[in-house]
Image: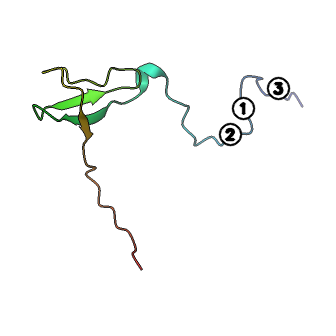
């Protein structure tokens, strides 16, 4: 039998369904709301926390669109 060895660059400890970690250029921006002009400001890691429209530095994180339910006792 002619069996070929497994390539060395494959990682056997990770499942095949897992996604590779995103690089800096692939990271999604998080949407924030400016505290002064109320414009939506996308902010990526490493970006300045500042509104691009008015320069205000207080930004509020936008609420998520999915439904979240907590169990209170």
Which color mode does the image show? rainbow
Q: Which circle, 2 or 3, is nearer the viewer?
A: 2
Looking at the image, residue 6 sits to the left or right of residue 42; the answer is right
Q: Which sits earlier in the primary sequence, circle 2 or circle 3?
A: 3
Q: Position of residue 6 (x, y in %)?
A: 79, 28
Query: Relative to 35, is 64 above or below?
Result: below
Q: Which sits earlier in the primary sequence, circle 1 or circle 3?
A: 3
Q: CA distance from mark 2 to mark 3?
A: 21 Å
* Residue closest to the eye, 4 or 14: 14
Q: What mark, if any, has residue 4 been given in the picture?
A: 3
Is the C-beta separation of discs 1 and 2 under 8 Å?
yes
Residue at far left of view: 37
* Residue closest to the eye, 34 or 24: 34
Total labels drawn: 3
Q: Secondary structure at mark 2?
A: loop
Residue highlighted by disc 1: 11
Looking at the image, residue 38 sits to the left or right of residue 45; the answer is left
Looking at the image, residue 10 sits to the left or right of residue 63; the answer is right
Residue name at image x 29 percent, y 60 percent: 67
């Amino acid at each position: 039998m002619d069996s070929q060895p497994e390539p060395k660059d494959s990682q056997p400890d990770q499942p095949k369904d897992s996604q590779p970690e995103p690089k800096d250029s692939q990271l999604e921006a998080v949407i924030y709301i400016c505290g002064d002009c109320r414009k939506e400001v996308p902010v990526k890691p490493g970006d300045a926390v500042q509104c691009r429209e008015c320069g205000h530095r207080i930004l509020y994180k936008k609420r998520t669109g999915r439904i979240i339910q907590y169990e209170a006792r």
